[in-house]
Structure formats: C-alpha cells, structure tokens
Amino acid sequence: MTSAVLVDIQDEVTCPICLELLTEPLSIDCGHSFCQACITGDSKELGIGQEEESSCPVCQTSYQPGNLRPNRHLANIADRLREVVLGLGKQLKVVLCAHHGEKLQLFCKEDGKLICWLCERSQEHRGHHTFLMEEVAQEYQEKFQESLKKLRQEQQEAEKLTAVIREKRASWKNQMEPERHRIQKQFDQLRSILDREEQRQLKKLEEEERKGLNIIAEAEGELMQQSQSLRKLISDLERRCQGSTTELLQDVSDVAKR
C-alpha cells in the first residue's frame, strides 16, 4: 500500500474536529462522521439537548443529537488503518498548509516547497510550475540518491586520508623514539662525565684550600712567636731604661744581639 493511498484513506476516516483517526465514529444524515467524544462533547459544550437541533461542524446541516448513528464500517476501516500504521512503525499525520489549512499535495518548483491548491492560485505562486508531489518525488529521490552517492564517496576518501595520516603519525613516532633514546643516553653520559669532573675539581680545590690554610697557620705561628719575642724585648728595654746605670748596661751585648 503506497503512502499516497494511505493518506487518501486516512482523509476519509479522520475526525474533522480532532484531526485524528475516528474513534467510535458517529455519522450525521449529511454524511459527515466524527468521533463520538468529539461530536457529543461539542453538543454538551453548547448546551444542546437530544431533541434540540444542532448543526454539522463541516457543512452546517441541521441535525438532532439523538439522531446520530454509529458507523461500524468507518470504525473498522479506522481500526485497520491503525494496524497498518503501527506495522509501518510510524503515525500518519495530515500535513496541512499553515496559511489555508488545506492538505499539502502540490510542489512548487520555483520555490522548492510543498503548497496547497489555494496557494497555487495565490499571487505568490501565480505562473509557477506546480506538480503533484508524486510526480516530482521520484525526480528528487534520484537527485538525493546521486548526492548521497557522491557524499559517501567523499566520506570514504576522507576516511582513507584519515587512516593514512594516522599511519604517518605512528610511523613518525616510531622514527622519533630511537632518536629520543639516543639523545637521552648521550646526555646521561655527559652528566656522568660532568659529575666525575665536578668531584675531581672539588677534591682539588679542597687540597689547595688545605695547603693554603697550613701555610697561613705556619705564618701565623711564626708571627706569634716574633710578637712574643718583641714583647719580651720591649719589656726588658723598658725595665733597663727605668732602672739604674748598672741595670742599663748589664749584659748590653746580649740585648743588642736580640
């Protein structure tokens, strides 16, 4: 069953009030049918009794709510259509024109969109090339399939290029890894050489420091001895100068030698 046939059947068993498939349909003498809840709810909202007259929501033909009759034939069709729709895995919806409320069943090539029969006669679409949806569906189906084919090919090429780039990245990393290890090894060796040289120079410096400190200590010791000798000599000379002539000249040759 084609989608066009399903839509036509759906139009026949669609409630004009709720725009859904008929549920427990009731028919008026004029031939229009409605869901029981929709048509009786409409009468209750208007406060119309069973014996009072009401008007058909579609054609305005007068009727009495008490004369509404169940339509099992439409109920069976609606139930079967629900089964078909559920089998297709989707709910058929009436696609209506946003401007006129009519079913969209024409395609305007100039504007590239679906329109209703009133749109076709409007100033906006006057002189345009319009076709039934079914007439142009195959053409656009083929165009889209061709576009899909090209896009899939481009996608495949892009995936191939991506794979090549990934391979190059992996190859480049593999090439760089040995070089990284070589550089690290060289610098480890250099650090080892520098560490040994640092220790050698520090030891040499310590030895020079030790020798220099020994020389300074020896010089300091000699100076201290000289200082003590000078203090003794100064003290002796002061004592001689302050003493008698005898004390002044006593052992004067030893003093001169000192």
Image (cartoon, rainbow, N blue to C red):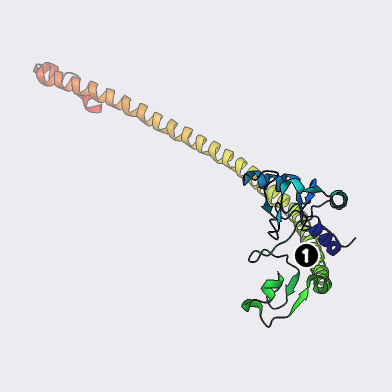
Crowding near the residue tagged with mark 1, few <14, some 14–19, many ≥20 C-alpha atoms within 10 Å = few
Give residue 236's position: percent from left, percent from top: 19, 20
> What's the residue at 10%, 16% (across, down)?
243
Question: Taking 43 as reference, is 9 above or below it?
Answer: below
In the displayed image of the protein, which residue is found farthest to the right? 1
Nearer to me, 106 or 229: 106
> What's the residue at 70%, 62% (across, down)?
96
Question: Taking 66 as reference, is 220 above or below it?
Answer: above
- Please state, as top left, top right, bottom left or bottom right, where the C terminus lies in the image: top left
Residue at disc 1, secondary structure: helix
Total marks in image: 1
Whether residue 198 sits left or right of residue 15 in the image: it is left
Residue 194 in which image quadrant: top right
In the displayed image of the protein, which residue is found farthest to the bottom? 127
Give residue 193's position: percent from left, percent from top: 64, 44
Give residue 257's position: percent from left, percent from top: 25, 27
Whether residue 238 sits left or right of residue 148 in the image: it is left
In the displayed image of the protein, which residue is found farthest to the front? 51
Nearer to me, 37 or 119: 37
Give residue 34's position: percent from left, percent from top: 75, 51
Residue 47 in which image quadrant: top right
Nearer to me, 2 or 33: 33
- Please state, as top left, top right, bottom left or bottom right, where the N terminus lies in the image: bottom right
Question: Taking 244 as reference, is 45 above or below it?
Answer: below
Whether residue 233 sits left or right of residue 222 in the image: it is left
The amino acid beneath tag 1 is Ala
Nearer to me, 180 or 105: 105
Q: Which residue is mark 1?
A: 158
